[in-house]
């Protein structure tokens, strides 16, 4: 009994030592770290490694094809006159890169008022690498998952639910988009030499990214402004526009009253003026012939 009391006393003195608490903490941390390393899914470490490789590969592509205008770290570049040669990409996110490069708008042939859509220069893998690098520069909207912009779920709804979803998308589009893209999604002129591009033939992913990032003169519609489900409904409405036949005859580019008014003035009234001139000329020749006789 006395031996047990002496042993307990020694342990008590060790626990009251200066470094006893630190030793216990280190042992606990080592045990926790070892248990996590043994039990944690290996996929997380592999995913982090894959993402690091994407970022490094994207950085190499960026230095070759983008740094001249945007700087080596995406900070932007000014020309000798202090004008913006290439804007900063810090904080724009991978979604902006995926949209700009995936639609061929970047790289630009030369700086201009607006970069038009053209043939894509980079492959899908290279676009993903560039997006990963820009996303690593600063927080921003990342490339959306397919579930974010997929509208196939609407086909599984009842007819009433489907119509309601498309109508919600139509109302959002009419409220926020028709001023630039017009009611038919065909695009139109903008101030200062810009233009709103047509939405016909644009993929669902790029439409979603455009709403998320606001390219060029377009406003940014974050998830706080328009939730992802409403963005999908807008995309579903645009899909119905492409499926609708032109019941009114010639669409005239789908530009609305501007195109129709121009057609009436140039073709309609112009044709009438030409016909009147022809009648007048023909009548004059007939009277001259009768006077000569």
Image (tube, grey):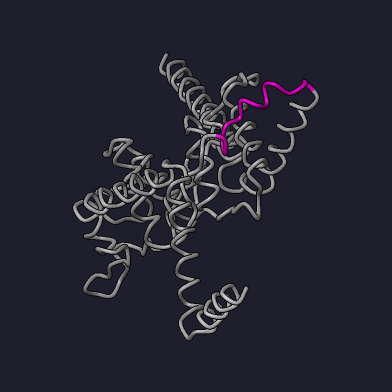
Left-right relation of 188 to 161: left
Coordinates of residue 293 in the picture (x, y in percent):
42, 13
Furthest toward the right, the residue is: 160
User: Per the image, is 150 magenta?
Assistant: yes
Assess whether residue 288 is covered by the magenta stretch. no
Determine the residue located farthest toward the bottom in the rendered image: 18
Towards the viewer: 171 or 192: 171
Q: Residue at x 61, y 18 (%)?
A: 245
Q: Is residue 79 above or below residue 99?
A: below
Q: Which residues are magenta?
A: 147-159
Residue placed most toward the observer, 262 or 246: 246
Asked if 172 appears above or below 200 in the picture, the reply is below
Look at the magenta stretch and give its main secondary structure.
helix
**Residue 249 appears at what percent x and percent y?**
60, 19
**Is the N terminus in the top left, top right, bottom left or bottom right quadrant?**
bottom right
| Front residue of 229 and 262 | 229
Residue 173: x and y in percent read: 65, 42
Residue drawn at 47 percent across, 77 percent down = 22
Residue 283, above or below 172: above
Horizontal arrangement in the rendering, residue 200 relative to residue 57 (left or right): right
- Quadrant location of residue 172? top right
Expressed as whole percent of the image width and height from the top left, the position of residue 49 reads 33, 48
Residue at the limit of the structure toward the top, as seen here: 293
Q: Which sits in the foreground, 66 or 60?
A: 60
């Amino acid at each position: 009994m006395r031996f047990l009391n002496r042993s307990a006393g020694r342990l008590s003195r060790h626990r009251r030592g200066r470094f006893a608490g630190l030793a216990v903490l280190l042992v606990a941390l080592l045990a926790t770290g070892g248990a996590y390393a043994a039990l944690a899914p290996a996929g997380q470490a592999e995913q982090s490694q894959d993402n690091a490789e994407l970022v490094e590969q994207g950085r190499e592509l960026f230095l070759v094809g983008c740094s001249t205008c945007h700087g080596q770290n995406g900070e932007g570049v000014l020309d000798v006159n202090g004008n913006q040669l290439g804007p900063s990409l810090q904080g724009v996110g991978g979604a902006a890169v995926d949209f700009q490069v995936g639609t061929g708008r970047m790289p630009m042939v030369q700086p201009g008022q607006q970069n038009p859509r053209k043939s894509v220069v980079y492959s899908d893998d290279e676009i993903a690498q560039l997006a990963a690098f820009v996303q690593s520069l600063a927080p921003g909207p990342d490339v959306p998952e397919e579930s974010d912009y997929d509208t196939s779920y609407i086909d599984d709804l009842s007819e009433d639910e489907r119509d309601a979803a498309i109508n919600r998308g139509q109302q959002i589009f009419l409220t926020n988009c028709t001023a630039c893209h017009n009611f038919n999604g065909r695009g139109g002129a903008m101030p200062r030499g810009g233009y709103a591009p047509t939405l016909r033939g644009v993929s669902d992913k790029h439409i979603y990214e455009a709403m998320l990032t606001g390219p060029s003169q377009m406003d940014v519609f974050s998830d706080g402004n328009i939730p992802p489900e409403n963005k999908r409904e807008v995309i579903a409405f645009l899909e119905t526009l492409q499926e609708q036949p032109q019941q009114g005859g010639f669409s005239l580019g789908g530009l609305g009253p501007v195109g129709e008014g121009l057609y009436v003035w140039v073709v309609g009234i112009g044709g009438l003026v030409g016909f009147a001139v022809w009648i007048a000329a023909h009548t004059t020749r007939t009277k001259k012939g009768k006077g000569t006789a």
